[in-house]
Image (tube, grey):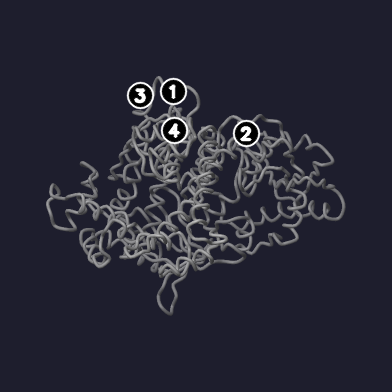
Amino acid sequence: MSSSASRHLSIDIETRSSADLPSVGVYKYAAAPDFRVLLFGYSWDGEPAQVADLTREELPLGLAAALADPRVVKHAFNANFERVCLSRLLGMPEGAYLDPSQWRCTMVQAAYWGVQGGLKQVAAFLNVDAQKDAAGTRLINKFSKATAKPVAFEGGDWERFVAYCARDVDCEMKVASKLPGPIPEREQALYVLDQRINDRGVGVDARLAASARAMAEADARESKRRLASLTGLANPNSPAQLLGWLQGRGCPIGGCGREVLEAEAAREGCDPLAREAIELRLASAKSSVKKYAVAEEAAGSDGRLRGCFQFYGAATGRWAGRLMQLQNLPRGDIHGPALDVARDVVREDGDPGLVRLLFGDVQDTLKSLVRTALVPREGHTFAVSDFSAIEARVLAWLAGEEWVLDVFRGDGRVYEATASRMFGVPIDRVDKELRQRGKVATLALGYQGGPKALERMGALKMGIPEEELPRMVRMWRNANRRTKQLWGEAERAAYAALSGEGPQKFARGAARARLDPSIDGLAIDLASGRSLHYRRARVDPADGSLSYRAAGKGAGALKVETYGGRLVENVTQAIARDLLAEAMARLEEAGYEIVAHVHDEVIVEVPCDRADWCLGRVNALMGATAPEWATGLPLRAEGYTCESYRKE
C-alpha cells in the first residue's frame, strides 16, 4: 500500500443471505443471489461511529470511493468478511475482490499480540465491552438470517440493530487501541499474500464430489440398516442403546467415542459380533467423507473453493484450516495407479458394489480420494512441493544437534540414523522394525514428550509393547542430549526474563525471552524477525510452574500452563512457519500462483506443457539456501506434479 495513506476508515457491516455462512464460507455466502449488505457502520480516523442504513439508501459515494482508494486504510475485525462482502456490494464479479493490501485486520493484529478468538473473546480478554449478548444474537437471527418469512427493516428492533452495528465499530476500534501496535510490515505483507491465495481459490471436481457424497450417504444408510439388523436395537444411532448392547456382549467400555470403539474392536478378546457392530457404527460416522459435501456446497459458480485458510490461526503464526480443513485431510490407504482407478470408478460409475469388489470398504476408499477432489484449472496441472522433515531440521538447528544436521546434509535418512543411535547398531543393519521405532521416537519425543507421547503417535498400534516405551524415551534422550538441554535452556530463559533479569538468549541465539510490559507478560523474539507473545505470563511462587493467559471460548481468560519442551515446540513451529512463508513469498514474486498449502507443502497451478520445468523451479525456490537469519540450517524441498491433488 502507498506510504502516503492519509486517512483510516474503520468498518463493520451487517448482512443478510440465504447461504449458511459457517457451512459455505464468506465467498459463497456473498455470492448468493439474495445477498445484501443491510448496514454499513464506519468511523473516520477514530471519530464516533456512524451507520449508513442501506435498506433505505445507496452507499454514500464518498464511502464507495474510499473502499477502492489506496490512500485510505480500511480496518475491520476479520477483515476478509468485510472485504469480500463489500466487493459484492460494489458489483465486482465473482473472482474479483477489493485489494487486500489496503486492509488491516484487527483480528490478525490481536492474534499476533497473543489474543486469539472472535470479537467477543478478544474484547472480553482486553476488558472491552463487546455487547455480544443474547439480545444481539436475537437481532442477528432476526435480520441477518434469510427465511421464507418476510422481515421488516423498521421499528424498535431495527433501531436497536443499527445501534448494535455502531457499537461494534466502536468496540473494534477500542480493541485495536488496547493492542501494543500494528503487526510487523513483513507479517502484513504475508497477510496480503494469504488473502490473495484465499481469493484465488482452488478448483473442485464437482462430479467426483457429488458422486462420492452420494455414495458415502448410501453406504452410511446401508451400514445403519445392517447395524439395526445385527443388534435388534430400535435406534442403533443412540450411543446409550449401543453402549448397553455392547456391554451385554462383554465389552468392558464406558462410552461410544471413536477412540474407545476403535480400541475395543482391536482388543484380542472382543466378541466377534460386537466387533462387527463397532465397525458398522464407525463406518456410518466417518467425518472425512463429509469433506466432499463441503467442497460441493462451498465451491463458487466457477468451480473454485475459496477461503480455506485462516492467517495466524495458531499462536505460533501457523495457518488454520477452514471449510474443507485442508490442514486435516486423511491420508488413506490407496496409492499410486490404484488411486486413479478408484477415482475413475467413483467419479464415472458411482457404484458402491463395484467399489467394494475392487477396494473393499467404501468409506475407506472415499477417504483415500478426498484430496483428489481438488483439481487445477483447464490447461494446468498441480506442482506440489514439500519441505522435507522441516520440524526435525529446525529443532536440530535450534539445539545444535550436529549429528542430526549432518544426516540432513547427507542422505536425510533421519529415522534410520536415529534408530542406529538409539539401539547401538550400524545404520546398514537397521531393519524395518527398528526404523519404525526411530520414526515414532523422532516424531513424538522432540518436545519433552514421554511414553504417552509415543502412544499418541501410534506406537502401540505399530506393535511396540507398552512396557518398552519408557526405555525408548530414555534411549532417544541419550541420543539427543543437546535437544534435551534445549528444553531446560528455554525454561530457564523464561524464568529469568520474568524475574527481571533482562533479555535471555537461548537456542544458540535464535530466540530471546524478555519481559514485555506492553502485554504484561513474556515475549520470545525469533531470529526471523517477529515475536511470540505470552500474555500475563507468571511463575507460580507455590510450585514454580510457568503459565500465561489466553482468550477463552467464553468471556474471560484461560490459564495455560507451559514448560521448556512446549516453549521449544512453539519456537520450532514458528521458525518452520516463517521458512514456509518466505518460500511462498518467493514463489509469488517469481510469478507462480499458489492455490493451496498444507502444513509444510505448497500447491501451485502450472501450465501442463511446462510442468516439469516449473516443478524444478518451484522446488528450487522452496528449498533455496536458508535465509541469513538461519545460517547453517539445511533445507530441502521435494515435489511432484499431479492432475488431481494427492500425497506421493
Indicate which disc, 1 or 2, sits on the residue closer to the N terminus: 2
Q: Which quadrant of the structure image shows residue 504?
A: bottom left
Kind of residue at disc 2:
Tyr
Query: In the image, which is nearer the foreground, mark 2 or mark 4?
Result: 4
Kind of residue at disc 4:
Val
Residue named by callout 2: 97
Could you tell me which secondary element the residue under label 4 belongs to? helix
- Report how far apart the C-alphas of labels 3 and 1 lie in the structure: 10 Å
Circle 1: is it few (<14), some (14-19), or many (20+) Cα within 10 Å?
Answer: some
Could you tell me which secondary element the residue under label 1 belongs to? strand
Indicate which disc, 2 or 3, sits on the residue closer to the N terminus: 2
The correct choice, above or below, for 289 with respect to 603 in the image is below
Indicate which disc, 1 or 4, sits on the residue closer to the N terminus: 4
Residue 578 in view in this figure: no
Could you tell me which secondary element the residue under label 2 belongs to? loop
Residue in the foreground of this view, choosing between 83 and 506: 83
Q: Which mark is residue 345?
A: 4
Residue named by callout 1: 607
- Report how far apart the C-alphas of labels 3 and 4 lie in the structure: 32 Å
Could you tell me which secondary element the residue under label 3 belongs to? helix
